[in-house]
Amino acid sequence: MNEETPSTSLKISMGSVTSNPMSDKALFNEENKKFYKIIIIVIIIDFILNELIILHDYILISFLEGDNEEDKDKDNDNQKSEPELLLFFLFTILSIIIFGLILYVLYLKKLILSKIARFCYLIIGILYYAYQVIIKFIYFGETGFELSPFNIVFFIIVSLTVIPRIMGFLYIRVLERSIVKLDKAKIDEDHVNFIEKVANNLDRSTVNKNKEIEYEKELDQTVEEDEEVIFKMNNENKVVGNNLNDNLIKRKKSKKEEEKEEEKEEVADLS
C-alpha cells in the first residue's frame, strides 16, 4: 500500500499538469511582457543618462563658470540662471514625453507602431548624440581643449548613452518578433474557437434533427395505434349492430309466427 500511494499521487499530479497546458497565446504573451520589461529598464537608463547631460548643459556649466569668474555681478548671475532653469525643465519634460510615448506605443503591441517607435528612437538618439558631440567640441575649442576631470566624466556619460539606445533598438526588434508570434497565436486560437463553435452548432443541429425524427416516429406510431383502436371500435360497433339487427329480425319473425298461431286458433274456435 505504501508503494502504490506515491505512484498514484504522481499520476494525478502529471494528469493535472498535462490536462491544462499553457496555450501558445499565453506563452507568447508572457514572452512579450518579459521583453517589454527589459525595454523599460533600458529606456530608464537612457533617460537618466540623458538627464545628466541636460543637467550638465544648463545647470552645472553655468555654475562652474560662475565660480571661475570672480568679476561677475550677482544680478547678472540671477538673470542668467532663470532661463537656464527654464530650459532644463523644458528639455526634461520633453524627454519624459518622448520616452513615455515610445513605451506607450510599444505597450499597444502593434507591429507597425512598434517599428515606427523603433526607428524614431534610433534616429532621435543618433541626432541628439551628434548634436552633443558637435556642441561639446565647439565648447572645448573655445576653452582651448582643456580636459578637466569633470569634462572627462561628461564625455564618458555622453559615450555611454550609445549603449542603451543600441540595446533598446535591438530589444524592440526582438519585441516585434514576439508580437508577430502573438498575433499568429491569436489568429490560430480564433480559428480553433470558430471551428469548435461551428462543430457545436452542427452537433446541436444533428441532435435537434434526431429529436425531430424520433418525435415524428413516435407521432406516427401513436397515429397508427389510434387508427387501430378506431378500426377495432368500428368493427366492434359493426358486430354489435349486426347482432341488434339479427335480434330485431328474430323478434319480428317470432311475432309473425305468434300472430299466425293466434289466427289459426281463432279459426279453429269458430269452426
Image: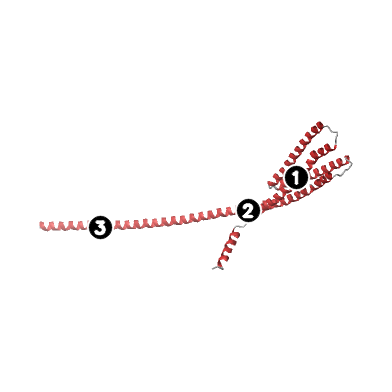
The amino acid marked with disc number 1 is: Ile
How far separated are the C-alphas under marks 2 and 3?
86 Å
User: What is the secondary structure assignment of the residue under circle 2?
Assistant: helix
The amino acid marked with disc number 3 is: Asn
- Labelled pair 1, 2 in contact (Cβ < 8 Å): no
Q: Quadrant of the N terminus?
A: bottom right
Q: Residue at x 83, y 37 (%)?
A: 67
Of residues 114 and 222, which is closer to you in this image?
A: 114
Image mark for residue 247: 3
Place of residue 124 in the rendered image (x, y in percent of width and height, measured from the top left): 78, 43
Q: Quadrant of the C terminus?
A: bottom left
Does any portion of residue 184 appear in the rendered image? no
* Image position of 214 with respect to 149: above or below: below
Q: From this viewpoint, which residue is outermost toward the right?
A: 144
Marks 2 and 3, the one that precedes in the sequence: 2
Q: Quadrant of residue 20?
A: bottom right
Of residues 108 and 74, which is closer to you in this image?
A: 74
Place of residue 75 in the rendered image (x, y in percent of width and height, measured from the top left): 81, 31
Does any portion of residue 132 appear in the rendered image? yes
In-image side of 222 versus 182 (left or right): left
User: What is the secondary structure assignment of the residue under circle 1?
Assistant: helix
* Image position of 93 with respect to 197: above or below: above
Image mark for residue 189: 2
Place of residue 187 in the rendered image (x, y in percent of width and height, measured from the top left): 65, 52
Disc 1 designates what residue? 48
Q: Residue at x 78, y 49 (%)?
A: 163
How far separated are the C-alphas under marks 1 and 2?
41 Å
- Labelled pair 1, 3 in contact (Cβ < 8 Å): no
How far separated are the C-alphas under marks 1 and 3?
123 Å
Marks 1 and 3, the one that precedes in the sequence: 1
